[in-house]
Amino acid sequence: MKKLLWSLVFSAILVSCSPSAAPPVLTEVSTPGYHPGRVVWYTLASPNPEVAKNFYESVFGWTTTPYGDNNRELWVFQKDQKPVALMARYKSDNNSGEWIGSISAEDVEQASSEAKSLGATILAKPVAVANQGMISYVQDPQGAHFSLIRMAGGDPEPNLASLDSFLGMELWSNDTEQSQKFYTDILDYEIEMRQEGDVDYTVFKKNNLNCLGMLQNPVENVRSHWLPYIRVADVNAALAKAREHGATVLLEPSFDIRNGSVAIILDPTGAPLALQVYNP
Amino acid sequence: MKKRIISLLLILGLSLFLPACANMHVTGGVGLNFSGGPYGMRVTPSVNVGMYGGGYRW
């Protein structure tokens, strides 16, 4: 009887100490090795996931799989059965959403602490998330949201994005000088200044890889924010679909801007994103 | 008999208490509050095209 009881105790410890079932999301995109400084994952913080789900499925052909409690809190977006992003239900003060890029960090706790000391707000302290890794959520001193991550199985290879997935993220900053100092201090970037047309453009680089872009926010009275770019085959077709499914168009394709290869929209929940034809 | 009951209660207690030792969470952002998207839902902003170059070379 005693042996049986101790077996039960041992089993209870084993079961209890195992991580809960969680979506094998990032383990599917991980590869050996890390690329610190790059945006390696994307999460849509959405106050209205049902509307967002319909939009991204219709415009980009993504499929959506629910996870989490009661299947109502967390969703995985997939394209051609490969995970491209997560969507999480967030409560928001203005009932609108935002894409949050996860930047690969060698030490999430240290980088988060450094960010806080430089005036950032830590929305979620570093925590180990099952099947994903160590993650924190941060609001930079100008209000832009981002995440720091150390993926459990390594970062995705820094290859060119496939169609209907993310190319990268760009910071639209109201104070580029302050933003440059902030992100360089916490993630140890090298800076390269460029001219994109008439626009001063900052590229954050690390280990000879382009990691992030930044320009002066071209929209008045809007706080600093990150803008994700999704690679599309035909920007006009993608824009027509987006409009049909409730997007607000911020910038129509124009020959003056990259030969009409870029459009900028707000999805139906208010999250900004860019559609770009990109064929290097 | 008393010993057995105590042991069973101990097992049940451990089963409830020990998930915390894994220190793992299933989701990353669920339940968080944030101020919301930069544009909100009611404004119709426009991009100053003279200040935008079309993104960088990825």
Image: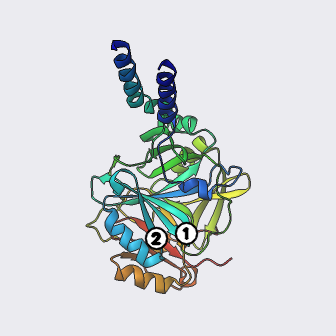
Q: Is residue A35 above or below residue B42?
A: above
Task: Name the secondary structure under disc 2.
Answer: strand
What is the C-alpha distance between the residues marked 1 and 2?
Answer: 8 Å
| Marks 1 & 2, CB-CB < 8 Å contact | yes
Task: Name the secondary structure under disc 1.
Answer: loop
Q: Chain of mark 1?
A: A
The image shows residue A211 at horizontal and vertical percentages of: 63, 57
Question: In this rendering, do the residues under marks 1 and 2 share a single chain?
Answer: yes
Res. A146 visible in picture: yes
The residue sitting at 52% across, 50% down in the picture is A179
**N-term-proximal mark, 1 vs 2:** 2
The residue sitting at 64% across, 44% down in the picture is A188
Near-viewer residue (A13 or A190): A13
The image shows residue A7 at horizontal and vertical percentages of: 51, 26
Amino acid type, callout 2: Thr
Q: Where is mark 2, residue-wise?
A: A63
The residue sitting at 51% across, 82% down in the picture is A235
Q: Is residue A55 left or right of residue A180?
A: left
Q: Is residue A201 left or right of residue B45?
A: right
Image quadrant in which the C terminus of chain B is located = bottom right
Residue closest to the far top = B2
Q: Where is mark 1, residue-wise?
A: A81
Q: Is residue A166 left or right of residue B12?
A: right
Q: Is residue A154 above or below residue A127?
A: below
